[in-house]
Amino acid sequence: MTSKIRAVFYFYRQFILVSVLLNFLFLFFGKPISLIVIFKLFLSSLVFYIYKTSYQNQLYFYQNLSLSSIKLFVFSFLIDVIFVMLSAGIYSLLL
């Protein structure tokens, strides 16, 4: 169980910098959290499509841990939503 959680975080680490920067950029321009989450859902779907078509061979590590690509991207999206909430809280404290 913990190896699967660590694997999801290992996969998500390649997106974390862009994700947090986008969170603060949207919050700086006053966009609501629901719009940010919908935009992140669109981006996650786009990245999922790119990975399924172009980078399928890079997902074998996660599939060997019995994490399907759909589970991997869903859990990554949920982590991203948590980071949106944390970014909104940090941004409100800064202002």
Image (tube, helix red, strand yellow):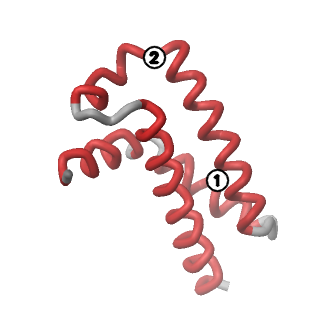
- Up/down of 20 relative to 60, above or below: below
Q: Nearer the viewer, residue 17 or 53?
A: 53
Where residue 77 appears, as percent x and y from the top left, is 53, 50
Q: Residues within 10 Å of mark 1 (few under 14, many from 20)?
A: some
Q: Amino acid at mark 2?
A: Tyr
Where residue 70 appears, as percent x and y from the top left, is 48, 35
Q: Nearer the viewer, residue 93 or 80?
A: 80
Where residue 75 appears, as percent x and y from the top left, is 44, 49
Q: Nearer the viewer, residue 56 or 67?
A: 67
The quadrant of the picture occupied by the C terminus is bottom right
What residue do we see at 50% from left, 45% from top?
Answer: 74
Looking at the rendered structure, the secondary structure element under dot 1 is helix
Q: Amino acid at mark 1?
A: Leu
Quarter occupied by residue 43: top right
Quarter occupied by residue 84: bottom right
| CA distance for labels 2 and 1 | 24 Å
For disc 2, the marked residue is 55
Quarter occupied by residue 48: top right
- Up/down of 90 relative to 39, above or below: below
Earlier in the chain: of badge 2 and badge 1, it is 1
Left or right: residue 43 compared with residue 78: right
What residue do we see at 28% from left, 51% from top?
Answer: 5
For disc 1, the marked residue is 22
Left or right: residue 62 compared with residue 39: left
What residue do we see at 49% from left, 49% from top?
Answer: 17
Q: Residues within 10 Å of mark 2 (few under 14, many from 20)?
A: few
Left or right: residue 46 compared with residue 74: right
| Front label number (2 vs 1) | 2
What residue do we see at 51% from left, 65% from top?
Answer: 82
Looking at the rendered structure, the secondary structure element under dot 2 is loop
